Image (cartoon, helix red, strand yellow):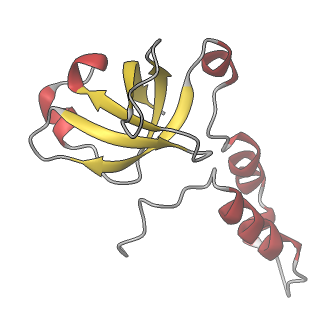
Amino acid sequence: MCSNHREYSLSDTIVVRFVQTFRDLPCVGENPLKDARWGELLDFGETEDVALANAGYLTARITRPFTDGFYVFARAVDGSRDFFVHRSATELSQRDFANLRLGQLLSILPGDSAPETGRAWPVKHAMLA
């Protein structure tokens, strides 16, 4: 796989537009991107779970995983904030947490108090998106 495979997902606007463009092209024979399954993937490939969003969760992408397995940094998909995610804020085992990779999506519940200027927001709870 290429080095960018974790930086893009089907929920990214650019990827959805790319697939939609190819779906809309005239095709000799049957266009496999017009299959019902691709329609479902595009319709349900949203990055945000409505119930979680209503509870205050944000979707963030891991920007800096650390191999020690204790914390990662993530950025909200809208680019508005950076987060500091300690393993204790998740329900992942140490092994699973250490295997988090650059670009993976997390659902994050930000901490109540804003961090000092230039610091990442602490996270109350995080889970795989």
Quadrant in the rendering for residue 1:
bottom left
- Front residue of 112 and 70: 112
Q: In this view, does 117 lie to the left or right of 78?
A: left
Q: Which residue lies furthest to the front in this view?
A: 117
Residue 129 vs residue 49: left or right? left
Name the quadrant containing residue 84.
top left
Judged from this view, the residue extending furthest toward the bottom is: 28
- Horizontal and vertical percent position of residue 91: 28, 17
Name which residue lies at 27% across and 39% down: 72
Residue beneath the point at 38% across and 35% down: 120
Image side of residue 46 versus residue 26, left or right: left
- Foreground of the two, 35 or 72: 72
Who is closer to the viewer here, 118 or 124? 118
Please state the horizontal and vertical placement of residue 64, each as a whole percent of the image: 29, 50
Q: Residue at x 30, y 18 (%)?
A: 89
Q: Residue at x 48, y 33 (%)?
A: 129
Nearest to the observer: residue 35 or residue 97:
97
Task: Work out whether 16 lies above or below 95.
Answer: below
Instruction: Note whether 6 is above or below 63 in the view shown.
Output: below
Residue 53 lies, in percent from the top left, at 64, 21
Q: In this view, does 31 lie above or below 119?
A: below
In the shown orientation, is residue 56 left or right of residue 96? right
| Residue farthest left in this picture | 68
Callout count: 0
